[in-house]
Image (tube, rainbow, N blue to C red):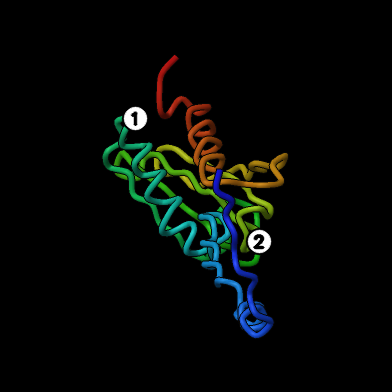
Amino acid sequence: MAEETTTPATPAAEAAKLAQPAAAKKPKEPTVEEKPFAEFIEQHFQPALTAALQKLGITDIKLSFKQDKIPVQGFSSSPCWQLTGNWLGGMRQFSIYFLEEDINGKKAFSQAEGGAKPSTLESFMIDERKVSLDLLLFYTLQRLNGQKWLTRN
């Protein structure tokens, strides 16, 4: 059997090898949820919610994302970010309020039917500490289905 022999590196070659910086790692892409709040809502959540609702047969959904006061009767608040959706010519409307500019922050929900203003403000996703796109989408669809707006019993 032949033995392999390697020539030992010279001290100068060894020093040059150590002086070279390690290969630079590519910066890790942020997850969808780590993106800026408005970008997450407008570029990821809104399109996903629109697609999910259209898949359930709601083809005339209109979603808007804006900063405004909460329009619940008898309630006054400072402006907050809100995603509002309506369909059937505005006869069904829901809003998700982001009380903090953070998907992991406090959220609220309201809904109205028949073109009326919302009269009740409900807490939304209060037990979730780490919110993902899929989780936000799931809770929204679950809440709308609770109104029997998506499927019938």
What residue appears at the point 55 percent right and 72 percent down from the top-left corner?
24
Tell whether 54 sits left or right of 80: left
Tell me the amino acid under the disc marked 2.
Glu
Give residue 150's position: percent from left, percent from top: 40, 28
Q: Determine which quarter of the picture holds residue 122.
A: top right
Q: Contact, CB < 8 Å: mark 2 with mark 1? A: no
User: Seen in the image, is 67 located left or right of residue 124?
Assistant: left
Residue at the image position 50 percent from the left and 40 percent from the top: 137
Q: Point out the residue furthest to the front here.
A: 1
- The tag on residue 92 is none
Side (left or right) of 55 relative to 29: left
- Tag 1's secondary structure? loop
User: Which residue is under mark 2?
Assistant: 100
SS of the residue under disc 2:
loop
Q: Amino acid at mark 1?
A: Leu
Q: Position of residue 65 (x, y in %)?
A: 45, 59
Residue at 32% of width from left, 33% of height from top? Answer: 55
Q: CA distance from mark 2 to mark 1?
A: 30 Å
